[in-house]
Image (cartoon, rainbow, N blue to C red):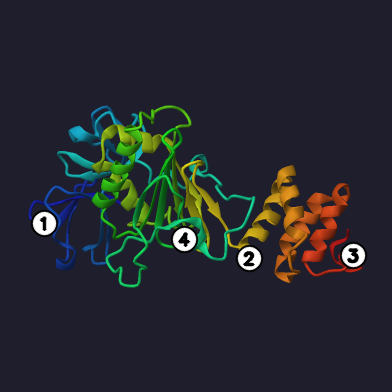
Amino acid sequence: MPNGMIHTSEDALRDLKTKQTYTIPSKLRGRPGGTLVTYTLAPDKTVDSITPGLVGKLDGDDAVDDATEQRVPLGAALRNVYPDGIQVRLYGTSTKIIALDPLGRVIGGKDRRIDLVDPSHAAPDNLSELGVSVEQDSDDKSDDDPDQVYYYVGKKSAWTTRIQTCTALAMWSRSAGLSYLSHADAATPSETIAKEMTRFFEAAAATDADLSASGELSVFLFTASDTPASRFSSLETTFLALNHIKGEYARYFFERAKCHIVGHRDAVVVSSTARPKVLRPYADYVPYLLTRYAERGEEHIRGILIDVLRTAEPNRDFEPQAYKAAKKAGTEHRDLQRLLYTVAGYSEQEAAERWDL
């Protein structure tokens, strides 16, 4: 989308590159003059949509608009927080950038992706066994259990689930033995998230934990597969919270942040003794193990699979993944092959015919 700036009269915007001016319909007005935006046009050349902010990069004390190379000074609190040259989304006016989203353009990429599924066991049927329940922070809390919390900072085990259009944020300080967990949607105030993040950072720092040290701080975001590419998403809400915390904390977050694509039935779990992890329900856990072994052939996953499949009920739904895992196992691991065709509901003769074993 092209970049624009709201006119001082607030009823029009000017394209930053072409300098053309376009009328903003009354339903889209209300942004202050000078606000930087991206936009689209209707067939009649009036403004059809407006999105706050635009894409650029950091250069010293300035942000540089990608489309026009126009330089805009950063607000004082944003200077020296993130490295020069990174791509960011810029929020503010033509005279000062007041907020940055430093991760929205990269968090779904391969350099920031991680798999945090714990392959050693499935989630319990009763998730309350995992500790403190962290519920989505939304305006309507009428159906929530009174024992649930919305932001967790502590040393106990805590969990959240049903992550669809939301984003769960989990952090862990290794030497402090302290974890954070929250579950926010696109409407959750960034300032609220920032307040709770600050509570975690300050509690960890109070134990003399060196959050800048390698391996000390873990930061993970858990989202559905389509969330990283969405605008006005719960990820953006979380990233904008970085503009409301101390610069050094925002920098630690930016440096450590990784993303795990989570299923809506998965449980995200934090504790005092290990980095955050994901537990999958049994119906998803077995296919995960089968697929992971078929793709990577890891010896420790083979051992886990053998233990799990010995007590698994036959299920034809497992056949596609079981077939691929059996091909990976080959004749070298006949013990695993037998368990794989059994869990798919086949006899040895049927498997030999159907799977060409």
Sequence order check: which comes first, mark 2 or mark 4? 4
> Which residue is identified by label 3?
348
- Residue 310, x across and y down, in percent: 78, 60
Circle 1 sits on which residue? 10
Where is residue 337 drawn, in percent x and y?
83, 56
Residue drawn 67% across and 60% down?
A: 286
* Residue 129 screen position, x and y as percent: 51, 59
Q: Amino acid at mark 2?
A: Ala
* Residue 11, quarter of the rendered image: bottom left
Q: Is residue 55 visible?
A: no
C-beta proximity under 8 Å, tags 1 and 4: no
Which secondary structure, mark 1? loop
Q: Decide if residue 86 is on the left or right side of residue 3.
A: right
What residue lies at 57% left-to-right and 65% top-to-bottom?
125
What's the CA distance linking mark 2 and mark 3? Answer: 24 Å
The quarter holding residue 213 reads top left
> How dense is the environment of label 2, judged by Cα within 10 Å: few (below 14), some, or many (20 and up)?
few
Of labels 3 and 1, the one closer to you: 3
Work out which quarter of the rendered image holds the C terminus and state it: bottom right
Residue 289 in percent (x, y) is at: 68, 54
Upstream in sequence: badge 2 or badge 3: 2
Classify mark 4: residues with Cα within 10 Å, few (<14), some (14-19) or many (20+): many
- Which residue in the rendered view is the most extreme toward the bottom? 143
Closer to us: mark 1 or mark 4? 4
> Badge 2 is on which residue?
283
Residue 161 is labelled as 4
Closest to the camera, between mark 4 and mark 3, is: 4
